[in-house]
Amino acid sequence: MYPHSGRGGPYRGDREEEYIGSRYLNQQHLRAPASGSFSSRATSSDRYYPSHRIEPPVDYRERDLEDRRSTENGEDNVSFANSMEKRKSLRKLLSRFADKTAMQGVGYISSAKYWYSRAIWVFLLLVAMGWMVFHLYYLISQFTDLPVQTKISLGFNNLQFPAVTLCSMNVVKFSELQTTSVAFQSLVALTQPSRFKPEDYIPGGGPPPPPQPPKDRKRKKRFVSEFDDLGNLTDYGDYYDDPSFRDEAFKDAKKDNLYEVENTFKNLYLAMPRGVRVQAGHQIQDMLLSCSFNGFKCFPVNFTLVNTPEYGNCFTIESGNFITKNPGPKTGLTLIFYTQNDEFLEGISQGYGMRLQIHEPGTFPMPDQEGIFLSSSFETHIGLRLTDITRITPPHRECNDGIEFKKVNKMQYSRSVCRIFCEQEQSLSQCGCYNHDYKEFFFFSNNTNKNRWCKTQQDIRCLATIMKEFGMQQRTCSCLNPCKEKKYSLFPSSRQWPTEAYSTILMQSLCEQFPAKCQRVVNMKTDPRSLALNFVKVTVYYEDLNYEEFVEEPEIATAQFASDVGGAVGLWIGLSVLAIFEVVQFFIELCAYGVHVWRYKQRKSKQIKKRKQRQNGYAIREEKDFANEKRYQENWNSYRHY
């Protein structure tokens, strides 16, 4: 603390002459030493230099008082500054850090004996720190980009069975045709095959047809030319025929007649109320002959009806209790259908069989987009393999968990369904109506706008404009991928079914369930081909309980990023975590030293200011004394004069 402590110091208590007197030494200490002996010399030394045990203790209060007085009087400032320099020295701070730090190169800079050696180590340290900063910048930029990698693994577990949707290939039963609209019946009558006579066009094949009016002669053209004016049967004809709403590449192209027939049929079908459409279609209780899952029976009440524009009534079976514990057809879902071919609309329905879609439970079925055909008179086995997809959540990627969507729309989220709702909501906001192709979506979502589908020509033109803007990407929808999704890979195989002998068993089952149709089926017994075309059998099962799992995860985890940063710092300048705290402590000490220097300068400036004020006070007092003395002298002289 005090650099001048000990004998000969600047303090009165430390000076040797202060305690040589009679208070500390008796008279015999002052006697001359005896000559000649070593002991006498030692004794003489002890007499003149008293031992430490008889020295009085240093009076620190007096020392502090003298320091304070000397500071106030501006004295011994050099000694005070030197003491403060020894207490806190930048050189000492740097030297201590260089000796103790684990950072590579700093110790060699401090201990180098030659200037060029020190310059080389400084250069190497700066280069290493530069490369370290570049390396860290690369690592941080790569980490902040939030890259994602997909981890593929093979899992094994009991599997939830998917939802299965089946549709008849015939939209409206012939026996229910009279319940439909007049325009719909007119279109069906216009497409009756009995109106077409291809034999009339065989060269030399029979007598020439009798002369007919021009209008009737026009109807005897080829089948594809019969429907040129079908657009007049529906309000949607102008939309389909108006070239202004087509793509530029097909603006002047002529539409296919069969395509127009199908679309006109769909528009007239959707124009009818839902109750009429459902009643006119095939019913599950009239078609289902057998249903079983894992050997246990299921019934028509286990199916949910969905009315679609393309296939009419479709039926979905799904249950949370359908859990597959063993692979193979025996533990799958087996269905046998009677397709009611005698109820088909001959000019509209173009083939026998059924449409099947396998989709994730809870999702809305769209068999026209994602389904496959099942052929009549065939048994089809469909093996499934599951792919479970789990996408990463924000902040790495955006995905939709489907919770809010299901709460609003009453159905599970999928990207295609989200896009449909998004487009129709924009149509509702601008045109006040939506496309009637999606009536069933609004029905199942219980939307308050479910009855506001576009009907007038003005509504249809507004809708066409919006759809064209979507096609040109002038309008967009923000439909993210679902955070969790299940995909099913289908591996179908089929065989001819049933045999003639097994057809008798099927007829027996059919007659037991539908006695009114028994006679019609028995009459087909003489024609096994026609009988077999009325039956479809399908078995859906998991080929294996193994499933592929795709999981998105961060490509650079937080622990990996910390390891990379530590490796970069350790590679270039040799710092560990604890060594980094050494650097932190060093900077803290530098800051503390800077504060100390600032305070010292502030204190010294105050001392100089006080000294100047004191000197100015002395000068003013001397001037006052001189003035008083002069006044006194003048008074005294005047007194003597009188």
Image (tube, rainbow, N blue to C red):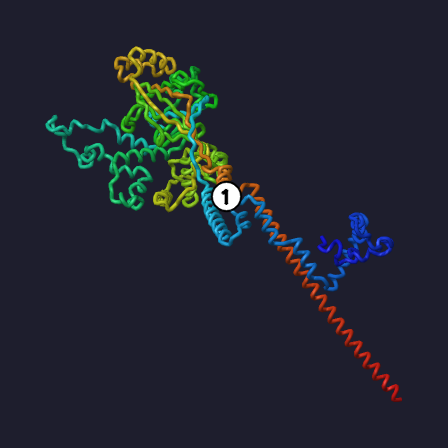
> Disc 1 on helix, strand or loop?
helix
| Residue found at the far bottom of this picture | 642
Is residue 55 something one can see in this rendering? no
* In front of the other: 94 or 363: 94
Judged left or right of residue 498, residue 482 is right
| Residue found at the far left of this picture | 204
* In front of the other: 37 or 634: 37
Q: Quadrant of residue 269?
A: top left
Q: Is residue 609 above or below residue 521?
A: below
Judged left or right of residue 583, residue 406 is left
Q: Is residue 120 above or below residue 400?
A: below
| Residue found at the far front of this picture | 36
Residue 325: percent from left, percent from top: 45, 19
**Residue depicted at x 30% and y 10%:** 501
Is residue 602 something one can see in this rendering? yes
Residue 72: percent from left, percent from top: 74, 62
Q: Is residue 624 above or below residue 586?
A: below
Judged left or right of residue 585, residue 353 is left
Circle 1: residue type: Val
Q: Quadrant of residue 156?
A: top left
Q: Which residue is mark 1?
A: 569
Q: Residues within 10 Å of mark 1 (few under 14, many from 20)?
A: many
Q: Quadrant of residue 374?
A: top left
Residue 268: percent from left, percent from top: 34, 34
Residue 579: percent from left, percent from top: 56, 43
* In front of the other: 39 or 422: 39
* In front of the other: 240 or 612: 612
